[in-house]
Amino acid sequence: MEDTIENFYKAFQALDAETMSNYYHKDVVFEDPAFGTLKGKSASNMWRMLCESQKSKNFQLEFSDITYDGSTGSAHWEAKYKFSKTGRKVHNKIDATFKFKDGKIIHHIDDFNLHRWAKQAMGFKGLLLGGTKFFKTALQKQTNQLLTKFESQIKKAT
């Protein structure tokens, strides 16, 4: 499963969401501060949306400290990119944990400092509000609306 984690992040470096999705169990649960909890296809579609948004841009990703103990794993990863809404540079540092079922990722949690991210992505507004529950709730509402819109575009294209 250590290879699964490594290959997942190699695919992310290449912005290859389809390969990333292949490492997810069909019943995967993904959690992070920006999206909250996503299940199944929505988790994979979140990666599709994020990868699509970074193509032809200066997205950089590094990963390290991959561990695996038989049924769980973890990794550290860092992403550098420009936040599309403000054009501000972001360097997000994330710690990920994984659980596996049937040789695939069944539970994936990305943990990062949302306040730190908000300060980078949104400047002064993020400094003031980024550490509040209000901000987290509003961000999750906005990101999930974007994901819903993205998913409806996928359905129309197929």
Image (cartoon, helix red, strand yellow):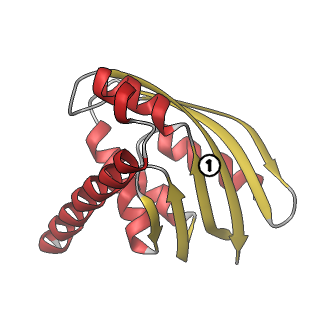
* Residue 53 seen in the figure: yes
Residue drawn at the location 27% of the way across and 42% of the way down: 53
Place of residue 45 in the rendered image (x, y in percent of width and height, measured from the top left): 35, 63
Q: Farthest residue in the left direction?
A: 156
In the rendered image, which quarter is residue 73 located in? Answer: bottom right
Relative to 122, is 8 on the left or the right?
Answer: right
In the rendered image, which quarter is residue 124 located in? Answer: top left
The one of 93 and 105 positioned closer to us in this rendering: 93
Compared to 44, does 96 lie above or below? above
Relative to 90, is 65 on the left or the right?
Answer: right
Place of residue 46 in the rendered image (x, y in percent of width and height, measured from the top left): 37, 58
Place of residue 10 in the rendered image (x, y in percent of width and height, measured from the top left): 56, 42
Residue density around tag 1, few if under 14, some if 14–19, many if 20 or more, within 10 Å: some
Q: How many marks?
A: 1
* Residue 81 seen in the figure: no
Q: Amino acid at mark 1?
A: Asn
Q: Quadrant of the N terminus?
A: bottom right
Q: Mark 1 highlights which residue?
A: 7
Compared to 63, does 51 lie above or below? below
Q: Quadrant of the C terminus?
A: bottom left
Relative to 63, is 87 on the left or the right?
Answer: left
Q: Secondary structure at mark 1?
A: helix
The one of 113 and 85 positioned closer to us in this rendering: 113
Residue drawn at the location 71% of the way across and 69% of the way down: 100
